[in-house]
Amino acid sequence: MRREKAPPLIALLAAIGAAFFVVPLIGLMVRTPWADAAGSLASADTLDALRLSLIASLAATAVALVFGVPLAWIYARVEFPGRSVLRALTTLPMVLPPVVGGIALLLAFGRRGLLGGWLYDTFGITFPFTTAGVVMAETFVAMPFLVLTVEAGLRSMDRRFEDAARTLGASRWTVFSRVTMPLIAPSLLAGAVLCWARALGEFGATITFAGNFPGVTQTMPLAVYLLLNSTNTESSYVLSLVLLLVSLVVLVALRHRWLGSA
Amino acid sequence: MSLDVAARLRQGSLDLDFQCEVGEHEVVALLGPNGAGKTTLLKAIAGLVPITDGHVRLDGVLLEDSASGRYVPPERRSIGFVFQDYLLFPHLSVVDNIAFGMRARGQSRSAAAATARDWLERLGLARYATDRPSALSGGERQRVALARALAPGPRVLLLDEPLAALDATTRVEVRHDLKRHLDSFAGYRVVVTHDALEAMTLADRLVVMENGRLVQSGTPVDVAERPRSRYVADLVGVNLLRGRAEAGAVQIAGGPRVAVAGATSGDVFAVVHPRAVSIHLAKPEGSPRNVWSGRATGMELLGDRVRVRVEGAVPLVAEVTPAAVAELGLHTGREVWTSFKATDVAVYPA
Amino acid sequence: MKLGIVTFCALIVAACGSAGPVGSPSPGAAGGTVDVFAAASLTDAFKAEGQAFQQGHAGISIQLNFAGTPTLVTQIEQGAPADVFASADTANMERLKSDGFTGESPSTFAHNQLEIVVAAGNPKNITSLADLARPGVIYITEGSTVPAGKYSLQALQKAGVTVTPKSEETDVKSVISKIELGEADAGIVYTTDVKAAGAKVAGVQIPEQYNVVATYPIVVVKGSKESDAANAFIAFVLSSSGQAILATFGFQPA
């Protein structure tokens, strides 16, 4: 089979495009003070931020799975008036500036928010300045990734397998858990990982809605930002590199599934 | 005790209006051209497609009834379905596939697996137990699909074009096995096919469906000898004419009069086997009463015979020897005369 | 087609750049554009300074960039094109100076003081710094590297009050926003911030003995391409008109 050669103009444009992403990564790796890296990583605040980031992003992914899979199922299988509008609304966080998302969350779930106000007055529950608030902010921005990916998987699967399962006596729940879910497992996994990676890197909505305090709401991205604006900028490079490498590993692992349904 | 179906529904361009009753003692083959609605009917019986009007009754119990709104979902109907593409679950092993129906109905993992392995032994496929379906050949997958449908012990077995996906040689072998399974199954059996030979071999009764409607029902011999539609006639390979019988002849609507033997009246079918049709280069003189001019529009070699299509007052197919074709210098486009005797025409009420 | 591409590129370039210009520039005349990086607490005051300056100096346009002071320092040190830097404390200015980014010596152009900010109507009845530590009061502050945050800690220390904030925001404006939204009950910002927020918040004075005086220095950034215009702007801010403008916003004179 003959290898196709890229036309010069396309190759040039592609190279520039690639460089745009590669150069920052190289810049970060070159400027990171490798000698002090261990020290930066081991500081209490950093470890706190790392631990908080992992816990919150995993929690956000779990929440996204519990509520996002049924949502994706409804979008893929059930016709109802206003479906496309609802779908657009739940996809909005993907294109919304995260800070705007944070403000919207405040207006809804803040202490004087639409729902948050009632929760506070009735039960004394608040979300801003809590780790739960971090999870909410991250779920808000990351869940659409999961919903879209799973929906695509459900739409493209052969539904006749579900028919076959029903004729064999499987209840609707059995069909869902023993046939549908396994068949869309690749999409489910890809969606969950994308969601997790997005949640891990979330900044704007988190700092706006949940605030910033070490150990409670100061996730890695916030820690990086604050270090950058202090005298200890080198530590921010180290943390940035950690976040970047984690994301890179995730994307490489997903390279076969990147373009939607497997 | 029967499987009694009356179904009226619309799906896309298909307008289905069908009724039939299947007994326990017979294997019914549902025969018809593509798009006739055969698969849709099977799905309606299984509950996978809703019936707008009508009912499905199994052993006297209503599974679905538009009048009362009753609807038993597919998973609670005792129906085994073998799909055209088999639809074996790709993420499960062969034994888990076969065990699926039993496990879905609550049996324990080990009990279901044991029964499944039994089936595999009987099918001679025990060595594939832990493999994925993709590792098996087409014929093997067909057998697994059948086992999967039979394992839960359903009252009804529905097969949708069971042999269509197989190549010619495998088909012969599998058809033989399938007949054995069908004959030994104690319940209602409906096989959908578009292959006449399959229908003839597997079925005790043929039900012909065209455009969503029932066209003919009878034993394979009945149907072959007395086709009631062009489709069946073509399938069986005879010339089928339809008209009004009166005084020793059948008047074809908008066509010629066909001389027939015996007195009949009313709306009739007239069948002439291609063997009985002769071809002449000039108008023949002799005893045959039915002599028509026409033009040869096509020729087909079938074994040691040649089937010649002739367009004339009525389109006819004649069967002659290759030698005759050579002798007459027959070719497409040639003007010819056809003849057949009145005594060679079989007439029966429409 | 080519003209289209050129026009498109020109539009892209024109759309880029930092926070928009104040007033309408007249390009080509003497002067140019002066990029002023100013602490968040100077937002309203410097917008007014910029407008007033432009009125008297045709041909020079002032572009303003507001953020927490440490953020601005980082931006400048990473190469952001600033001509003038106005800091909310001397420590950050010192940092910029010792890193070699300042031209001449900085000049002090204003002072500010701290004030407790609470929701309009003071629903939690906060009257002193000690009240901030009351259980049930949600107190937020600015990050410790932000001048206001540092000053707040100093004030609390002076008053002997220990309180753990629920959040460390990036600048005074974020603190004000959260108080306005009702998310937090109290914070410590500058008196000028309380004044600027108007009826949306209420202020509680901090006694003189606990209060901290914030010193605001201003300087021309080293390597500025508009040093003449930059110096002119600084001179304006230090002039009586400039000082008068600052006073209307609640700042204390240099």
Image: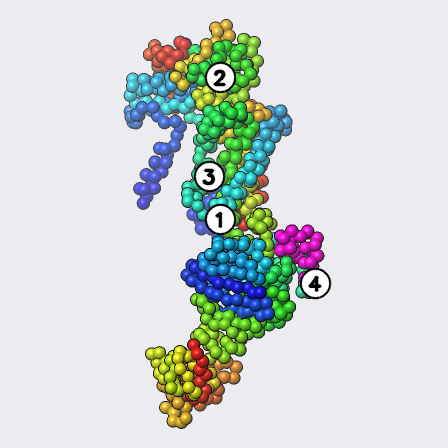
Find the distance from the CA under tag 2 to the CA under tag 1: 49 Å
Query: Mark 4 packing: few (<14 Cα in 10 Å), some, or many (20+)?
Result: few
Q: Are marks 3 and 4 in contact (CB under 8 Å)?
A: no
Marks 3, 4: nearer the viewer: 4
The three-letter code of the residue at mark 4 reads: Glu
Query: Is B109 contained in the magenta span?
Result: yes
| Circles 2 and 1 on the same subunit | no
Q: Is mark 4 on a helix, strand or loop?
A: helix
SS at badge 3: helix
Q: Can residue B55 be seen in this snapshot?
A: yes
What label does residue A115 carry, if any? none
Q: Kindly identify which chain the residue marked by label 1 belongs to.
A: A
The residue under label 3 is A90
Picture residue at 49% right of the left edge, 60% below the top = B55
Q: In which quarter of the image is the C terminus of chain B?
A: bottom left
Percent x, y of residue C43: 40, 20
For disc 3, the chain is A
Q: Do labels 4 and 1 share a chain?
A: no
Provide the residue designation for mark 1: A77
The Cα atoms of the two marked residues, 3 and 4, are separated by: 52 Å
Q: Do the residues labelled 2 and 3 touch (CB within 8 Å)?
A: no
**What residue span does the magenta drawing correspond to?**
B92-121
Q: Nearer the viewer, residue B217 or B312?
A: B217
Report the side of B235 relative to B77 (left or right): left
Task: Tell me if mark 2 has few (under 14), some (14-19) or many (20+) residues whose alpha carbon lies within 10 angstroms of its own.
Answer: many
User: Circle 4 sits on which residue?
Assistant: B121
- Position of residue A117 in the picture relative to residue C44 (left or right): right
Predominant secondary structure, magenta span? helix
Q: What element carries label 2?
A: strand
Looking at the picture, tell me which residue is in the foreground, A169 or A103: A169
